[in-house]
Image (cartoon, rainbow, N blue to C red):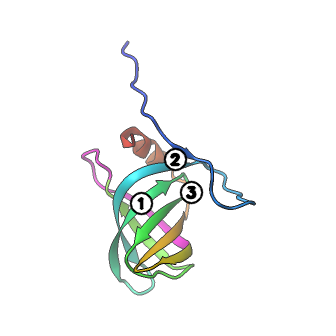
Amino acid sequence: MAKAKRKNLEILKDTGYENDKRVFSRFAVDNLPMRFKDLKIGQRGSAVCHDISGSGAGIDCSQEIKPRTPLEMWFDLPDGFEPMHLLGKVAWSQSLGDAWKLGVSFDKARFMSMARLLKVVE
């Protein structure tokens, strides 16, 4: 039986918060493209994901999206299959000059989606 090739995954431990209560480890991803739809007003946009876990993601966006905004999201994984589709809401947003950094919380923990993601992340 052939041995599985293991990928080098960077687990992000320094979250910048003293009382971080995350259940799932976050994994760094290298500018993973994603698209989203604001479910309140129907506006669509694109962003870049820089870290992801089983329950949420950190994304960089060019437009402001307020906390508690429900989102439909599509993460474009480089595995040749359909985009990874998730629902969630913005947990927090922070201005970075002309860009925005967002923390998104998924509605449900998505273990099968994470397994797919971990196969393509290096």
Q: Residues within 10 Å of mark 2 (few under 14, many from 20)?
A: few
Residue 82 part of the magenta segment = yes
Where are the magenta residues, as a range? 77-91
Q: Position of residue 62 (x, y in %)?
A: 37, 77
Q: Which residue occupies 41% across, 46% down?
A: 117
Extreme residue toward the bottom, this view: 41
On screen, residue 80 versus residue 73, left or right, reads left
* Residue 75 % position (x, y): 36, 58
Residue at 35% of width from left, 83% of height from top? 43
Q: Which residue type carries mark 1?
A: Cys
Secondary structure of the residue carrying numbered label 2: helix
Residue 22 in percent (x, y) is at 66, 55
Query: Vertically, is 16 above or below 38?
Result: above
Which residue is at the front of the view, 95 or 72? 95
Question: Dot 1: few (<14), some (14–19), or many (≥20) neighbours within 10 Å?
Answer: many
Return the residue at label 1.
Answer: 49
Q: In front: mark 3 or mark 1?
A: 1
Q: Residue at x 52, y 67 (%)?
A: 104
Pointer 1 or 2: first along the chain: 1
Looking at the rendered structure, the kind of residue marked 3 is Ser
- Name the one closer to the observer, 88 or 48: 48
Quarter of the image that includes the N terminus:
top left
Outermost residue on the top side: it is: 1
Q: CA distance from mark 1 to mark 2?
A: 18 Å
| Label of residue 111 in the image | 2
Cα distance, mark 3 to mark 2?
9 Å
In this rendering, the answer to whether 110 lies above or below 17 is: above
Residue on which the image places disc 3: 55
In front: label 1 or label 2: 1
Q: Nearer the viewer, mark 3 or mark 2?
A: 3
Name the secondary structure under disc 3.
Answer: loop
